[in-house]
Image (spheres, rainbow, N blue to C red):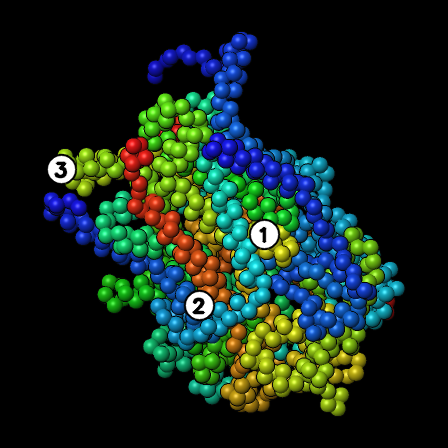
């Protein structure tokens, strides 16, 4: 008896294996019902669906819907999946991914050129990109991917990344903090009077993670736009920000804070979680905190009623007289680029689909929702319906159920306008202020401002951020070395115990960066940047 | 050394009859063959067949070109790995940390199994055993955050305790001291996995013939004696096997714990091979370098296993293969 | 049990209880803490001051996870995978391990070498994917079961356990005329319940917790597993934090859950079934069995 059971089991296994081989595999071929064409597409948003009120309207208008293949986890997992797809040919009909992944597919010939299709089926795409249309082209002259244009006139919700607690400002009589020295003095005075909050030590200055402290913060403190690890000078030469003299001054500021016990004691071993905890307890007085990390913290503070521990956002500079260029706008948002793979038989449908989002109707539907249900229009001005706003407040998942904001791949951006003259999105200069709480309005009133963006100069158009461009291939290896040096070296400079040590650590850092190939990295990037500028100027002037 | 000249059987030229008799003998074992060969084939299919992918280690592999079309670059990918001045430090960290984890985990699990085995109150034994294995299911992110919070110089439990006891007058920045990292990493790992790795030993202890204990009890043996003379010898074969297998994995540490607990101040102590590979292959973007590392690790592991297996064979009866 | 208790024995016992109690407390804490966090308001959790009990009790975190329609189906599939996968895998592993414990088996040595080496070599993601695809296993349930059918580690653990069983047991069965398969079922398996329970646990937990094969090979929702669905919710909550400027601005109203709370709640949801099933296996390796009983 057992004999047969065992043999059977081992045979069954072999059979299962074989049947697996022959198992029929229904391919992702589009199941067309009526006039609707279904394409497959990757999605980094889990459980994305067209089965929502807004999604259904989009399908109705365009005759297209998508079957999503979800890509979860971090960017590593995503890259793995895209590589595996490419190697096996299992990729979906449409892919939206980073320019780097797109390049791999382009080199493999897996995605098709789109310019002829756009000429024929994408009049609105062309129209909205306007003079920037040629920026979509790769060096070979073809267009392989489409992404959102940036038609923003004024970024309504931009804010500087240096933050200071309202309590600190109140104590100091609401000065407008412009330099790090000023901040230092104000913090020092405040800590002397209020060393503790709820029985725990306050932390005068902190930042959520190491790279933000030594890489991003000094660039912002020099008033430079976010070019990743770089600063671009007036002659359009690219420099590594880390060795700029002003960066040294910034490190010195942190070093002085540290010597006086005013720098977060665990600045370099903080995680977002532990940083958020301290900030949400209200203990962090000031710091360099990007907007998207700030959001949750301020929600938590507000929920606890700690309005004095909310933060003002100032562009603080290393020294007086630095001009701020943080408020920048680039012509495109090339980060999530749509490409059509060579599997698709009717790519014109996809172009038409995309084209729909370049119309007022498409924009309205994806960002404002359905008229009468999600928003209403009075005197040509759109506003979120109070009923819907209330529903969202009570049920955080209602947006997903409605599809509200779920299809905004091609949004023109907050602060851009539709052809009818109204704002394209609900987050616009008219509404931002309404989202602030009374405490914030009060603080802003002391400075005679309405929104945090008012502390920044008027938006400035720049051709691109360096991180939007394809890095020169040799640079990757160099950056690995440079990053290693910075990661180890910069904290040593900042935490140096005395001036002599500070100087020697700084010099060591500079030497090591030089050995790691700083010069070459800068040259490579200067070349890439200038090449891009040339393309850019040509593209813009030809119109 | 003893010199007994022994010709390995396979070098002897087999005569027809010998071969025939071997096949016949195997035929007699057809049941064993049936119970093993299908599964061995399965292992070969899923573990050995994909090894053609190792070719990518010698290429500038591009997914769409495959190993047949990608450019051959010789040992360049290995050079990327080994040429870096950090490589030796990274190798040292890897071996030290996995060595520490191996020894503490090994001794800890056996000790815990033995101690649990001594508990007579059954519900207590069951509860403790259950509770100790739970951290295995808690993700490293959570564990690391608890450790960081616990050791924080800014109001962390340990520093508060030491300050209140008056043992220190200034908080210690545990996570900022390179020399502490190995210890913290080891204790964290022990905390998370100790109970889980005890399960095997408990099973082996449960399988020891209870007559042995009864006989010892009649002889008036103390608990300690029974432990030393029955339980520990009973555990040894399994323990040895597990030890050999983990020595093989010495170089294969993973990187999660080091990445989550590490920071710029201790990177020279915390960076391990897998973490390093992630950075030199640009977060996994350079596929070939990843394969080269995986190949390197495979060879080192197999070498280690063969050596340790050889030693174990000399010292005891147990062997892995 | 033993009427004569010496002083060192009693001291040892006492110490043992105290030590194990402390250890138990230390290892329970992370899970207990997650339990508290899962029932705590996410904005309060952010402040990092939840230790043993929720500060602001809420069921919101669970509500957010459970409102996912796909969860129930995924959970059922996960159970199916775990049950089918474990039964097949433990069965096959036992058979293979048994053959390797037979000293007279002629292929013992080469098979051992093949198995051990296979633990340490890895051809990389792409070749394995291509293999799975060529076998037609992508987008099938079988891909969850077949590639991992034989866990070499488990084979070796079992083999070692079988090796330790008294050879006399097998011999006496042989004299009674039992075949190899007969010996396996009548003698070896009944005597090896502790190690079978252990391997069953390892395999079952492995199946229950895995999501990467689901992610890589099966993109259809109809084959999606619980861990993967939870992984998606986690990804979503992380990306909401980083990308949703609107949420960041709505201070007063939006009380969404945070990645931290989702992670805690997820851990509780997936770990509870294991804790529930565990005692049924635990009794086999905590209490032990008497080999003598089988011998009679």
Residue at the farthest front position: A1
Callout 1: helix, strand or loop? helix
Q: Is residue A168 above or below residue A122?
A: below
Q: Which one is in front, A13 or B279?
A: A13
Between disc 2 and disc 3, the foreground one is 3
Query: Marks 2 and 3, Cα distance to the nearest angstrom?
Result: 52 Å
- Are discs 1 and 2 less than 8 Å apart at CB? no
- Crowding around mark 1 (Cα neighbors within 10 Å: few <14, some 14 to 19, many 20+) is many
C-alpha separation, residue under disc 1 versus residue under disc 3: 57 Å
Q: Which residue is mark 3?
A: B220
Q: Quadrant of residue C245?
A: bottom right
Q: Secondary structure at mark 2?
A: helix
Cα gap from disc 1 to disc 2, whole angstroms: 26 Å
Q: Which residue is mark 2?
A: C38
Residue B243 location, quadrant = top left
Given residues C208 and C122, the one toward you in this image is C208
Which numbered mark, 1 or 3, is in the foreground of this view? 3
Instruction: State the count of labels.
Output: 3
Residue at left 71%, top 50%? A26
User: In the image, residue C14 lies at what x, y percent?
Assistant: 18, 52
**At which x and y percent is residue A376?**
70, 86
**Between residues B49 and A103, which one lies in front from this camera angle?**
B49
Secondary structure under badge 3?
Answer: loop
> Do badges 1 and 2 share one subunit?
yes
Q: Is residue A405 visible?
A: no
In the picture of the structure, the residue carrying the numbered disc 1 is C214
């Amino acid at each position: 008896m057992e004999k047969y059971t065992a043999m059977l089991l081992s045979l069954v296994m072999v059979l299962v294996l074989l049947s697996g081989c022959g198992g029929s595999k229904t391919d992702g071929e589009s199941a067309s019902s009526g006039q609707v064409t279904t394409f497959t597409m990757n999605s980094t948003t889990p459980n994305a669906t067209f089965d929502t009120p807004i999604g259904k309207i989009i399908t109705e208008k365009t005759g297209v819907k998508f079957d999503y293949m979800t890509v979860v986890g971090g960017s590593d997992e995503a890259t793995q999946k895209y590589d595996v797809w490419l190697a096996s040919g299992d990729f979906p009909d449409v892919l939206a991914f980073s320019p780097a992944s797109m390049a791999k597919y382009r080199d493999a010939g897996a995605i098709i050129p789109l310019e002829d299709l756009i000429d024929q089926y994408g009049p609105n795409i062309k129209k909205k990109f306007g003079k920037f249309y040629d920026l979509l082209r790769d060096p070979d002259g073809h267009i392989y991917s489409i992404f959102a244009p940036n038609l923003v006139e004024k970024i309504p919700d931009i804010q500087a990344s240096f933050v200071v607690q309202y309590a600190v400002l109140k104590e100091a009589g609401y000065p407008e903090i412009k330099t790090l020295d000023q901040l230092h003095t104000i913090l020092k005075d405040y800590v002397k009077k209020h060393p503790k909050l709820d029985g725990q030590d306050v932390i005068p200055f902190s930042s959520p993670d190491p790279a933000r402290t030594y890489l991003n913060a000094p660039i912002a403190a020099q008033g430079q736009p976010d070019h990743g690890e770089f600063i671009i000078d007036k002659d359009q030469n690219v420099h590594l920000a880390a060795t700029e003299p002003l960066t040294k001054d910034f490190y010195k500021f942190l070093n002085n804070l540290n010597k006086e016990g005013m720098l977060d004691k665990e600045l370099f071993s903080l995680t977002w979680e532990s940083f958020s905890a301290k900030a949400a307890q209200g203990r962090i007085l000031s710091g360099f905190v990007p907007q998207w990390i700030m959001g949750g913290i301020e929600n938590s503070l507000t929920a606890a009623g700690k309005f004095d521990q909310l933060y003002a956002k100032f562009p603080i500079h290393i020294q007086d007289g630095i001009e701020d260029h943080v408020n920048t706008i680039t012509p495109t948002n090339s980060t999530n680029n749509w490409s059509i793979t060579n599997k698709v038989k009717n790519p014109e449908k996809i172009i038409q689909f995309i084209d729909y989002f370049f119309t007022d109707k498409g924009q309205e539907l994806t960002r404002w929702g359905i008229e009468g249900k999600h928003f209403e229009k009075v005197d040509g001005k759109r506003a979120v319906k109070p009923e819907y706003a209330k529903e969202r407040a009570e049920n955080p998942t209602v947006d997903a159920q409605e599809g509200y904001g779920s299809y905004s791949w091609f949004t023109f951006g907050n602060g851009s306008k539709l052809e009818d003259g109204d704002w394209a999105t609900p987050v616009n200069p008219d509404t931002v202020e309404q989202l602030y709480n009374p405490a914030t309005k009060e603080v802003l009133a002391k400075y005679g401002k309405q929104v945090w963006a008012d502390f920044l100069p008027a938006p400035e158009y720049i051709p691109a951020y360096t991180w939007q461009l394809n890095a020169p291939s040799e640079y990757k290896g160099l950056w690995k070395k440079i990053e290693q040096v910075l990661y180890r070296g910069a904290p040593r400079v900042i935490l140096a115990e005395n001036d002599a040590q500070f100087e020697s650590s700084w010099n060591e850092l500079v030497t090591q960066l030089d050995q790691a190939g700083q010069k070459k990295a800068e040259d490579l990037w200067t070349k890439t940047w200038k090449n891009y500028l040339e393309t850019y100027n040509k593209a813009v002037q030809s119109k | 050394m003893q010199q007994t000249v022994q010709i390995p059987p396979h070098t002897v030229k087999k005569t027809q009859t010998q071969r025939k008799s071997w096949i016949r003998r195997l035929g007699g074992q057809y049941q064993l063959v049936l119970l093993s060969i299908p599964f061995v084939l399965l292992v070969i299919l899923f573990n050995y067949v994909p090894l053609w992918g190792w070719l990518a280690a010698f290429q500038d592999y591009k997914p769409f070109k495959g190993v047949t079309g990608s450019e051959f670059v010789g040992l360049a990918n290995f050079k990327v790995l080994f040429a870096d001045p950090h490589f030796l430090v990274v190798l040292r960290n890897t071996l030290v940390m996995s060595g520490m984890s191996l020894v503490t985990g090994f001794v800890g699990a056996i000790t815990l199994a033995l101690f649990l085995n001594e508990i007579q109150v059954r519900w207590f034994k069951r509860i403790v055993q259950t509770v100790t294995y739970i951290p295995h299911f808690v993700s490293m992110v959570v564990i690391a955050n608890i450790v960081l919070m616990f050791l924080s110089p800014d109001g962390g439990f340990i520093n508060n305790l030491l300050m209140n006891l008056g043992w220190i007058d200034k908080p210690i920045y545990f996570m900022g001291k390179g020399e502490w990292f190995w210890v913290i990493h080891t204790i964290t790992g022990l905390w998370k996995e100790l109970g889980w790795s005890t399960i095997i030993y408990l099973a082996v202890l449960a399988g020891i013939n209870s007559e042995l204990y009864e006989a010892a009890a009649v002889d008036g043996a103390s608990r300690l004696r029974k432990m030393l003379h029955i339980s520990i010898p009973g555990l040894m074969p399994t323990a040895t096997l597990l030890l050999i297998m983990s020595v093989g994995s010495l170089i294969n540490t993973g990187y999660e714990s080091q990445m989550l607990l590490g920071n710029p101040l201790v990177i020279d102590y915390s960076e391990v091979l897998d973490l390093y590979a992630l950075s030199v292959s640009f977060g996994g973007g350079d596929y070939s370098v990843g394969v080269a590392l995986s190949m390197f690790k495979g060879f080192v592991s197999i070498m280690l296993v063969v050596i340790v297996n050889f030693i174990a064979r000399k010292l005891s009866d147990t062997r892995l293969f | 049990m033993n009427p004569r208790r010496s002083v060192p024995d009693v001291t040892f016992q006492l110490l043992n209880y105290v030590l194990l109690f402390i250890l138990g407390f230390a290892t329970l804490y992370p899970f207990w803490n997650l339990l508290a966090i899962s029932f705590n308001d996410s904005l309060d959790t952010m402040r990092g001051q939840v230790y043993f009990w929720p500060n602001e009790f809420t069921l919101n975190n669970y509500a957010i996870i459970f409102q996912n329609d796909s969860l129930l189906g995924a959970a059922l599939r996960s159970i199916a995978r775990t049950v089918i996968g474990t039964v097949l895998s433990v069965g096959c592993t036992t058979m293979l391990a048994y053959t390797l414990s037979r000293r007279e088996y002629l292929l013992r040595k080469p098979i051992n070498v093949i198995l051990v080496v296979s633990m340490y070599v890895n051809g990389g993601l792409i070749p394995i994917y291509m293999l799975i695809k060529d076998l037609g296993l992508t987008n099938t349930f079988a891909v969850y079961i077949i590639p991992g059918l034989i866990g070499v580690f488990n084979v070796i653990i079992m083999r070692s356990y079988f090796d330790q069983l008294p050879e006399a047991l097998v011999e006496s069965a042989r004299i009674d005329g039992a075949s190899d398969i007969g010996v396996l079922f009548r003698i070896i398996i009944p005597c090896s319940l502790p190690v079978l329970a252990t391997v069953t646990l390892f395999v079952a937990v492995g199946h229950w917790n895995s999501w990467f094969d689901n992610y890589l090979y099966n993109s259809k929702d109809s084959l999606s597993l619980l861990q993967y669905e939870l992984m998606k919710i986690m990804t979503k909550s992380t990306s909401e934090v980083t990308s949703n400027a609107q949420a960041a601005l709505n201070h007063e109203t939006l009380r969404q859950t945070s990645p931290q709370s989702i992670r805690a709640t997820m851990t509780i949801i997936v770990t509870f079934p294991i804790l529930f099933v565990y005692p049924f296996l635990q009794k086999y390796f905590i209490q032990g069995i008497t080999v003598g009983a089988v011998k009679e």
